[in-house]
Amino acid sequence: MTAEVVAGLRALGMNEYEARVYSTLVGLQKATARDLHEISGVPRGRIYEILNDLARRGFIGVEEGSPTSYYVLDIDLVFDRLKDDQIRSLDLTREALKRLSVKPRLPPDSFFILRSDWAIENHVSALFRRVKKSMVILCYNPEFLRRHYAAIKPLEKRIDLYVVVRRKEDYSEIKLPIYEARGAVIDLLNTPPVNESLIDLRQDECTILVDGRDFLVIATAGSGRHAVIGSDMPIIGYLQKTVVERLEEAA
């Protein structure tokens, strides 16, 4: 029995005594209540209650006799069942929460700021999953495309995808539909989709426009990486349409 194992079992919902008894029994494979009490250090007055509860929950088996013995059930089967139960519970909870939530319509100038890498990457992945018709990526840094290449590449087959950059030669090894900004598109590449006076962000990663309604800007503010996201803003549809028209004219 180790502190790490006990901590892991407690994360599965066992209390301290249950974790100690179960891990002790795993080590012994088969034991009486007295053995488990003495080795695990769990009070004698609690040992039968704990063993009966572990048996009821499917962790251990009971061999009737004098004295009664307890044995470990197949650990792989037990934990596969636990994993399935956890996934099923998470799915049910997620669906229940979706039924509870009511998505508000954002006012025209509404946007939100994401301030953690996890939140930013999660939102980027969500945009890649839900895009239906077209996506424009105004890219300032090739590292963004390299990091997300596996998710972006399949989009090329099902949507109109445009990756717009300042210098195409900087992206020569990236096999995506990459367009070099020219004329008015250069100005658009340098124009943030939100009012500069509202937030001080230096655009050094990318701006993504999706289906003429969603946008995401990833940039650095001070020493931190931030993102601005928004939806249902009329300017986004205009920007995306303008970029696509200019790119097709240049082509």
Image: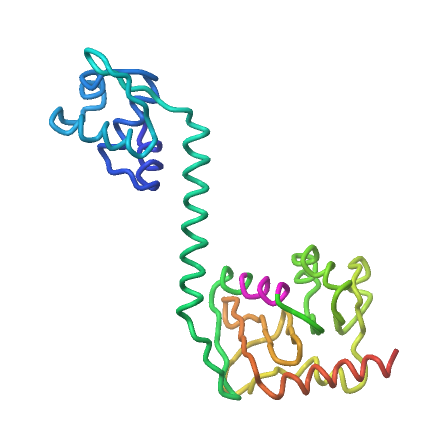
Query: Does the magenta-highlighted stretch encompass residue 229?
Result: no
Does residue 170 sit above or below 74 in this rendering? below
Does residue 156 sit above or below 24 in this rendering? below
Which span is picked out in magenta? 122-129
Q: Residue at x 52, y 70 (%)?
A: 226
Q: Which of the colour schemes (rainbow, by chain, secondary structure, one colour) is used?
A: rainbow
- 156 with respect to 85 (left or right): right
Q: Position of residue 137 (x, y in %)?
A: 69, 71
Does residue 72 sit above or below 94 in this rendering? above
- In this orientation, which residue lies closer to the viewer: 37 or 123? 37
The image quadrant that residue 24 belongs to is top left
Q: Position of residue 231 (x, y in %)?
A: 55, 79
Q: Position of residue 44 (x, y in %)?
A: 13, 24
Q: Quadrant of the N terminus?
A: top left
Q: Residue at x 27, y 16 (%)?
A: 31
Seen as rendered, the residue at the extreme left is: 45
The image quadrant that residue 160 belongs to is bottom right
- In this orientation, which residue lies closer to the viewer: 71 or 2? 71
- 44 with respect to 88 (left or right): left
Seen as rendered, the residue at the extreme top is: 66
